[in-house]
Amino acid sequence: MKFHAVKILIMIRLLGKDKPIPYDLLLLADETIESIDKYIHQSEIYVFEQDQAMIAVFALQMIDSDTAEIKNIAVDTAFQGQGIGQRLLKDAINLAKEKGFKRLIIGTGDAGIQQLYLYQKVGFEIYDIKHRFFIDNFPEPIFENGIQLKHMIMLKKDLA
């Protein structure tokens, strides 16, 4: 039996403002379209494509001249666990550096154990907690890993 190597084309690109917003992917990391719409129109959307299929996304928003925030980062469930999320984070870090930002921030729920691990693995550090964020900003309780989300854990990475 003979095996042939197959090259899979993987690409990250900025989504054009005229293109449809990939809500299906963004909803993997955020609860409602309404919550996504609060930030997505002020963000640059980067998509991760494999063989022309969109399999992951992140949204990068300028907070001020020194700080950018990853507002959403998500990988299609069929492709999770393959290092794509880590690659997206590294690309977001490099993009923020290229754009001249000194700091990159990201937030996640207090029960987001996998996210907290991943973010810290690539160099983010916890710097703040937005108490009651998920209680005060969403009409229904949100559960992750069987635990109700209450607080937003904020992490930062200095880029200098």
Image: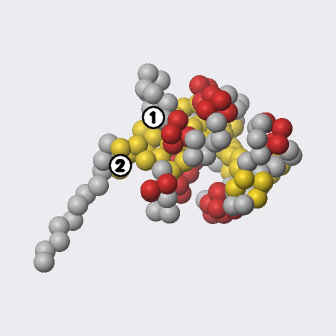
Q: Nearer the viewer, mark 1 or mark 2?
A: 2
- Pick the residue in front: 95 or 49: 49
- Residue shown at the point (35%, 49%) measured from the top left: 50
Q: Position of residue 157 (x, y in %)?
A: 68, 51
Residue 91 relative to residue 69: left or right: left
Distance from the alpha carbon under mark 1 to that under mark 2: 15 Å
* Image quarter (top left, top right, bottom left or bottom right) of the N terminus: bottom left
Residue flagged by tag 1: what amino acid is it? Leu
- Residue shown at the point (32%, 42%) measured from the top left: 52
Asked which secondary structure carries label 2, the reply is strand
Asked which secondary structure carries label 1, the reply is strand
Toward which corner of the image does residue 16 lie, by quadrant? top left
Q: Which residue in the rendered view is the most extreme toward the left?
A: 1
Q: Where is residue 130 in the image (x, y as percent from the top left)?
A: 83, 44
Circle count: 2
Task: Mark yes or no: residue 153 visible.
Answer: no
- Residue shown at the point (45%, 40%) measured from the top left: 47
- Pick the residue in front: 155 or 55: 55
Q: Where is residue 9 in the image (x, y as percent from the top left)?
A: 30, 50
The mark that comes first in sequence, 1 or 2, is 1
Q: Which residue in the rendered view is the most extreme toward the right?
A: 131
Residue flagged by tag 2: what amino acid is it? Gln
Mark 2 surroundings: few (<14), some (14-19) or many (≥20) residues within 10 A? some
Q: Which residue in the rendered view is the most extreme toward the front?
A: 140
Query: Where 74 falls versus 38 (above or below)?
Result: below
Question: What residue did someone put label 2 on?
Answer: 50
Mark 1 surroundings: few (<14), some (14-19) or many (≥20) residues within 10 A? few
Q: Which mark is residue 14?
A: 1
Toward which corner of the image does residue 145 lie, by quadrant? bottom right
- Residue shown at the point (46%, 62%) measured from the top left: 82
Task: Mark yes or no: residue 140 visible.
Answer: yes
Q: Which residue in the rendered view is the most extreme toward the bottom?
A: 1
